[in-house]
Image (spheres, rainbow, N blue to C red):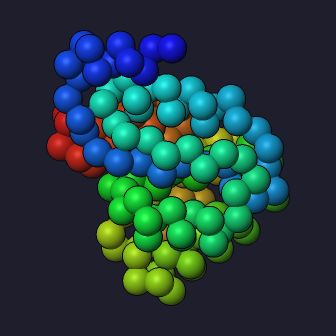
């Protein structure tokens, strides 16, 4: 309901984001809060949904050419899948074309560094701040 109001308010376009909850996890509330906040700041967000396999993230990066990829996970079983997304992006030569942000209860800054993600967003506010910084909005 509020998306059309963003355009009316003249919020400048900032960049593209592909985001999803990785395979093995069905939690969506945190991801959806991040999406709403990103959209309110002018980001064009593609929501891949929940239980998203690595190859779907890779395909979305090929198709959408985003500035940022966000991976969410609440359950600890998703860490392997986040690693698979990173491997898929590297294999397809896409890793260096996007910034990667991970978030959710299952991950940390240390985990982000371990898999080669650019950052960990502990909160939705952190995620939006990082995204704005990465596209020159801060």
Image point 20% across, 29% down: which residue?
12
Res. 26 image quadrant: top right
Q: Is residue 110 among the parts visible in the rendering?
A: no
Image point 56% across, 26% down: which residue?
33
Image point 40% across, 29% down: which residue?
39
Estimate the x, y position of residue 105 in percent, counting from the top left.
70, 41
Q: Is residue 30 left or right of residue 67?
A: right
The relative height of residue 87 versus residue 138 in the rendered view (above or below) is: below
Image point 30% across, 30% down: which residue?
42
Res. 13 image quadrant: top left
Q: Quadrant of the C terminus?
A: top left
Q: Residue furthest bottom?
A: 91
Q: Is residue 53 among the parts visible in the rendering?
A: yes
The relative height of residue 92 versus residue 55 in the rendered view (above or below) is: below
Q: Is residue 67 left or right of residue 108?
A: left
Estimate the x, y position of residue 120 in percent, counting from the top left.
50, 48
């Amino acid at each position: 309901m509020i998306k059309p109001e963003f355009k009316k308010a003249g919020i400048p376009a900032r960049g593209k984001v592909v985001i999803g909850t990785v395979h093995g996890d069905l939690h969506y509330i945190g991801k959806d809060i991040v999406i709403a906040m990103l959209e309110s700041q002018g980001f064009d967000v593609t929501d891949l949904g929940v239980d998203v396999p690595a190859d779907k993230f890779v395909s979305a990066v090929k198709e959408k050419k985003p500035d940022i990829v966000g991976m969410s996970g609440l359950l600890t079983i998703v860490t392997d899948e986040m690693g698979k997304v990173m491997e898929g992006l590297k294999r397809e030569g896409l890793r260096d074309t996007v910034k990667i942000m991970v978030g959710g209860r299952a991950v940390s800054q240390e985990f982000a560094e371990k898999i080669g993600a650019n950052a960990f967003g502990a909160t939705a506010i952190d995620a939006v701040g990082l995204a704005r910084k990465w596209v020159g909005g801060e």
